Image: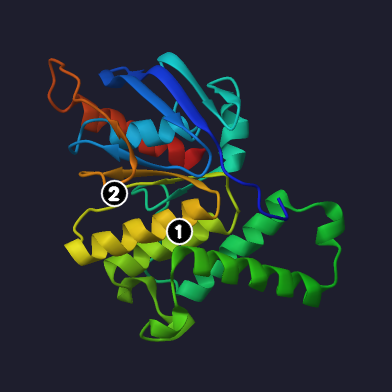
Amino acid sequence: MDGPQGGAAVVAAGFGVKGPRGWAFRDVGVDAEPGTLVAVEGPSGSGRTCLLLALTGRMRPAEGTARVAGLALPKRAAAVRRVSALAHVPGVTDLDPALTVAEHLRERALLQRRFDGSWRALLRPRRERAALARQRIDTALAGAGLDLDTLPKKARTAVRDLERVEALRLSLALALVGRPLLIGVDDTDLKLSDRERDEVWNQLRAITADGTTVLAVCSEAPEGALTVSTAPVRTDDPSTTDKETADALAEAGRA
């Protein structure tokens, strides 16, 4: 993926995920054009994260139909994972608090080059490869709205010293390094002030303006977003959905 790829259309009907302990969510519908900001709205424990994982090919649905970038789920889940990325998902995309921002970005760029580069690209001179990686990182940082010069130690700032919004932006930048067609963002507005929420939503809108489709889990959808709700599913065990989400996160981390 050497250039802009546009976004992914996301279409689902009667979509649901069920595990050994019951339904995480069910009967969800989505109809999003490429480059749409989709707000996955609902209370904590209502299956929001499970929906995010299912629509990015990281969790198997139990009912309904879905297509992402024209790829049917779950049959083409591996292909959906290749064109999508996750950001800020606890248990899946956790940042290492001991590593610096630069180390996270460098590691991500190296992994991306190894897994999506052609043999010809891998055989380029080291200086040329380094310049291309730097360009990809700079583009991702701009897309996430993370200005390294504003950090306490610039690129050498450790993750443990980042503010919550800065950490979210770094996670977004790491996702954008791969130039995905679809980005899934979890806990978008968790523990943020009104001003910080506005900043984050504006940044996600900017990402969609560049063509990338964004699925963002939130407690309250912002104005202008395509809203998809996950209604709580009644079960005999009130903690069922939380258990299913934990199982899904563990599985997604291995995907």
Is residue 253 visible in this depiction of the protein? yes
Residue 33 in picture, x, y percent from top left: 50, 35
What is the spatial separation of the Cα atoms under label 2 and label 1, in whole angstroms? 18 Å
Q: Residues within 10 Å of mark 1 (few under 14, many from 20)?
A: some
Residue at image coords 60%, 26% = 71
Is 41 or 248 nearer to us in this picture? Answer: 41
Hey, which residue is sitting farthest front in the picture? 224
Residue 173 in picture, x, y percent from top left: 49, 62
Residue at image coords 28%, 71% = 163
Residue at image coords 18%, 58% = 191
- Left or right of 66, for residue 195: left
- 180 w.r.t. 47: above or below: below
- 142 w.r.t. 64: above or below: below
Disc 1 target residue:
206
**What colour scheme does the image use?**
rainbow
Residue at image coords 36%, 31% = 51
Disc sitting over residue 73 in the figure: none
Q: Nearer the viewer, mark 2 or mark 1?
A: 1
Disc 2 target residue:
187
Q: Secondary structure at mark 2?
A: loop
- Left or right of 224, for residue 60: right
Residue 19 in picture, x, y percent from top left: 33, 19
Check whether the beta carbons of the residues at disc 2 and disc 1 lie within 8 A of each other: no
Is residue 61 visible in this depiction of the protein? no
Which residue type carries mark 2?
Asp
Q: Secondary structure at mark 1?
A: helix
Answer with mark 2 or mark 1, whichever residue precedes in sequence.
2
Residue 245 in picture, x, y percent from top left: 30, 33
Which residue type carries mark 1?
Ala
Q: Residues within 10 Å of mark 2 (few under 14, many from 20)?
A: many
